[in-house]
C-alpha cells in the first residue's frame, strides 16, 4: 500500500465515528419528540371562579384531585386553577362558551397536550418523556391519565389500574403473562411499572441487566467462569414477559443451549467412527476418544437437560468440565 493510500485510510478511520453518528441521525436512530405549547392569541386570565360558574361538575371533581388542591407556591409553569391547562379564558367567556377560544388537551395533538403537562411535570421519571417510545408513537398524556380525576381517583390519575391500563394496548404481553412461566403480575406481587417507566424506558440508568439484578442479585457475580449471555443481556436466554418454557427461558433445554454450544460428549460422531474405524481424519480416531454413551449418544443429548450437570449456568467459580477424561464423564 502506498503512503497516500495509508494516509487516506487513517483519515477514514478518524472520520468513522462522525459518519456513524450522522447515519444514526439520518435514519432516526436518535429521536426526540419536539413539544409545541399551544396559545390563544389575545386572551387573558379570568380566574377559576369564573370557570366553575358554568362547569360545576368539573369544579366538583377537582375537589378530589391533586390538581385542585395545589397551593400557590406549588405551581411551577402554570397559572392557578383551570387556566393552568386550558389557557386564558377571557375570549372563551366573551364568546359564550366558544370552544375554539379555549384549550382542550383531549382534542390537541400529542405534542401540544404534552407541552401543557410539561409546564409542571418535568422532573424525576418524567424528564425522559420526549425520548420515550410512547411519545414517539404519538401517545398523549390524556390517553392514560384523566386530568380531572374521579371521586376516588387512582394513583397518578390513571384511567385504569396497572397492569390493566397497559394491557389495553399491549395485548401480546398480556397473553404472555398467562403463560406457565411468568413474573408474578397477575398474582399481584408486581406490575408493569415495577420494571418499566411509562414516561421513559426501563427503570434502569445503566444496563438492562442491572434492572434484573435488582431482584435477582444472586446471579450478579463476579464469577471466575462467567457466562457471556448473562454478562451481556439476560433477555438472550429469558423472556421477561412470560414463556411456555421453564424459568422464563425463550426455549426449553437443551435446544436453547445448543444454539450456541456444540454438543460435546453426548453428540460425538460415534456413528461415523463406527462406519469408518480406520479413517484417521475422524475426530474420534485422531484423539482416541471413546463415546461411552454408544450409538445412542445423539438421542441422549436431546433427552437430557444441560443443567443436569451444569447447574450454575449464570456463572461459577468452578470449570464447566472435569480437567481429566478429555471432557467426558465415565
Image (spheres, rainbow, N blue to C red):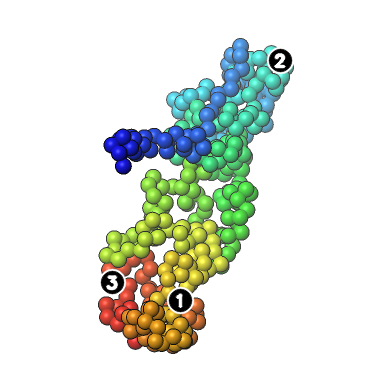
Is 10 positioned to the left or the right of 112 in the image? Answer: left
Q: Residue furthest front?
A: 2
Residue 241: x %, y % from top left: 53, 58
Q: Earlier in the sequence, mark 1 or mark 3?
A: 1
Q: Nearer the viewer, residue 84 or 262?
A: 262
User: In the displayed structure, would residue 215 be above or below residue 70?
Assistant: below
Q: Earlier in the sequence, mark 3 or mark 2?
A: 2
Q: Quadrant of residue 8?
A: top left
User: Residue beneath label 3, please?
Assistant: 318
Front disc: 2 or 1:
1
Q: Residues within 10 Å of mark 2 (few under 14, many from 20)?
A: few
Tag 3's secondary structure?
loop
- Tell me the CA gap for discs 2 and 1: 75 Å
Kindly tell me whether residue 129 is visible in this rendering: no
Q: Which mark is residue 95?
A: 2
Going 47% across and 51% down the picture, which residue do you hit? 195
Going 46% across and 26% down the picture, which residue do you hit? 76
User: In the displayed structure, would residue 243 be above or below residue 162?
Assistant: below
Q: Quadrant of residue 100?
A: top right
Residue 205: x %, y % from top left: 39, 45
Q: Nearer the viewer, residue 3 or 179?
A: 3
Front disc: 3 or 2:
3
Q: Earlier in the sequence, mark 2 or mark 1?
A: 2
Is 188 positioned to the left or the right of 109 in the image? Answer: left
Tag 1's secondary structure?
loop
Q: Which mark is residue 305?
A: 1
Going 29% across and 60% down the picture, which residue do you hit? 222
Q: Are marks 2 and 1 in contact (CB under 8 Å)?
A: no
Residue 217: x %, y % from top left: 36, 60
Tag 2's secondary structure?
loop
Amino acid at each position: 500500500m502506498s503512503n497516500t493510500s495509508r494516509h487516506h485510510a487513517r483519515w477514514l478511520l478518524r472520520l468513522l465515528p462522525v459518519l456513524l453518528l450522522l447515519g444514526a441521525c439520518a435514519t432516526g436512530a436518535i429521536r426526540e419528540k419536539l413539544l409545541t405549547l399551544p396559545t390563544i392569541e389575545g386572551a387573558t386570565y379570568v380566574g377559576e371562579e369564573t370557570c366553575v360558574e358554568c362547569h360545576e361538575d368539573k369544579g366538583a371533581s377537582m375537589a378530589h384531585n391533586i390538581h385542585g388542591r395545589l397551593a400557590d407556591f406549588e405551581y411551577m409553569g402554570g397559572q392557578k386553577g383551570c387556566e393552568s391547562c386550558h389557557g386564558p379564558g377571557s375570549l372563551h367567556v366573551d364568546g359564550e362558551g366558544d370552544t375554539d377560544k379555549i384549550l382542550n388537551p383531549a382534542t390537541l395533538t400529542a405534542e401540544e397536550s404534552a407541552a401543557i403537562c410539561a409546564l409542571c411535570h418535568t422532573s424525576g421519571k418524567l424528564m425522559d418523556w420526549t425520548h420515550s417510545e410512547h411519545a414517539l408513537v404519538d401517545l398523549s398524556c390524556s390517553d392514560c391519565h384523566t386530568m380531572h380525576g374521579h371521586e376516588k381517583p387512582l394513583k397518578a390519575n390513571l384511567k385504569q389500574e396497572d397492569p390493566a391500563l397497559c394491557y389495553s394496548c399491549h395485548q401480546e404481553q398480556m397473553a404472555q403473562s398467562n403463560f406457565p412461566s411468568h413474573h408474578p403480575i397477575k398474582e399481584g406481587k408486581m406490575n408493569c411499572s415495577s420494571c418499566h417507566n411509562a414516561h421513559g424506558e426501563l427503570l434502569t440508568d445503566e444496563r438492562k441487566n442491572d434492572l434484573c439484578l435488582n431482584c435477582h442479585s444472586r446471579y450478579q457475580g463476579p464469577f471466575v467462569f462467567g457466562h457471556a449471555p448473562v454478562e451481556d443481556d439476560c433477555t438472550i436466554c429469558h423472556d421477561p414477559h412470560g414463556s411456555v418454557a421453564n424459568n422464563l427461558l425463550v426455549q426449553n433445554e437443551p435446544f436453547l443451549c445448543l444454539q450456541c454450544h456444540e454438543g460435546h460428549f453426548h453428540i460425538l460422531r460415534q456413528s461415523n467412527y463406527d462406519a469408518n474405524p480406520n479413517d484417521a481424519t475422524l475426530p474420534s480416531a485422531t484423539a482416541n476418544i471413546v463415546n461411552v454413551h454408544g450409538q445412542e449418544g445423539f438421542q441422549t443429548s436431546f433427552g437430557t437437560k444441560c443443567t443436569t450437570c451444569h447447574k450454575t449456568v449464570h456463572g461459577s467459580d468452578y470449570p464447566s468440565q472435569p480437567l481429566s477424561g478429555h471432557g467426558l464423564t465415565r
